[in-house]
Amino acid sequence: MSQSPTSPQGNSQLEIDLSTAHSQHQSPLFYKIPAEIRNEILRLALVAYDDPEKLYARETYWTRPGFKGQKKIDMQLLRVCKRIYEETKVVPLSELEVCFYFGDRDRRPPELHHMNLSGAPKYVQAFTPTQWSQITSIRFIAQMYMLEERTLCSNIFTARSQLKPSTVTITLRYTDWWWWEDNAHLSTKRFVDMNSLRWPDSVKTVIMEMETIEVKRKELDEVIKTVCENPDTWLWRRKDGTELRVVQGQVGEWTWQGPTTFGGKRTFKHHGTGDSMGYLVKVLTWKAV
């Protein structure tokens, strides 16, 4: 995404005089299609997607469903007319999920290699306070050891006081677990520091995606069972003291086929000899009570 989502020209300071906007009643989009349907059409047209011209190589630590390339939002729609601009100007940011990577340099996309231990795409680094305030969803993709750092996630919000998301997603990839290279047993020991981290008061939902390979399904099931059977231990808290508790009976699951080697170099005995293997993702949801 090379342009600012708040203006057609990419200039966040651009002022557009909407008082001169044409009603567009001659257009079927405005006089025939109901507003709720029209808004959904416009929303879908402004959703971020993987740029087909900037796809990642398959055998990387970061390539996975939903993250197969650099994100892009087509902003041409906002240039069509002032009426469309007025109805859609807040959509790109309100629908955008800002993703932060925590971990070593080789565990995040090349466009983020310039960052230190955590990073987000360059375009968000230029966001204004108003733009940050419009973000409702963020994601942390993190190696397990980074989630032991008590202030890491908190610093994201401290540096951006206007950032008040309602949904936070934490993604643990197969290669983010402790000692995955040695086929170590999945465990809740040295897990995520849920006791120290405090989410902003705006957070209503925390989603955690836990990924492993299919042959370790039983081990991941044990982790899920431990969390669900001990809700008083495995809970999140907001700064205002509100608890976010795991939603019982709601465990999402999806699978995908991915590489057995990473970077085209490292091979692992427990991955087999083929070039593909099954990956399993379990999803837990915490809600504010």
Image: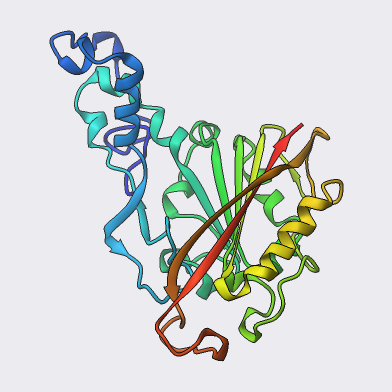
Query: Residue placed at 36% from the left, 58% from the top?
Result: 70
- The x and y percentages for residue 149 are 75, 62
Query: Residue placed at 79% from the left, 58% from the top?
Result: 226
Snapshot quadrant of residue 65: bottom left
- Tell which of 86 and 127 is nearer to you: 86
Q: Is residue 15 visible?
A: no
- Tell which of 211 and 11 is nearer to you: 211
Query: Residue placed at 32% from the left, 15% from the top?
Result: 35
Snapshot quadrant of residue 32: top left
Residue 247 shown left or right of residue 87 in the figure: right
Q: Is residue 61 above or below residue 111?
A: below
Residue 31 shown left or right of residue 282 in the figure: left
Q: Is residue 30 visible?
A: yes
Q: How many marks?
A: 0
Q: Is residue 38 above or below residue 175?
A: above
Query: Residue placed at 22% from the left, 30% from the top?
Result: 79
Residue furthest to the right: 232
- The x and y percentages for residue 242 are 80, 34
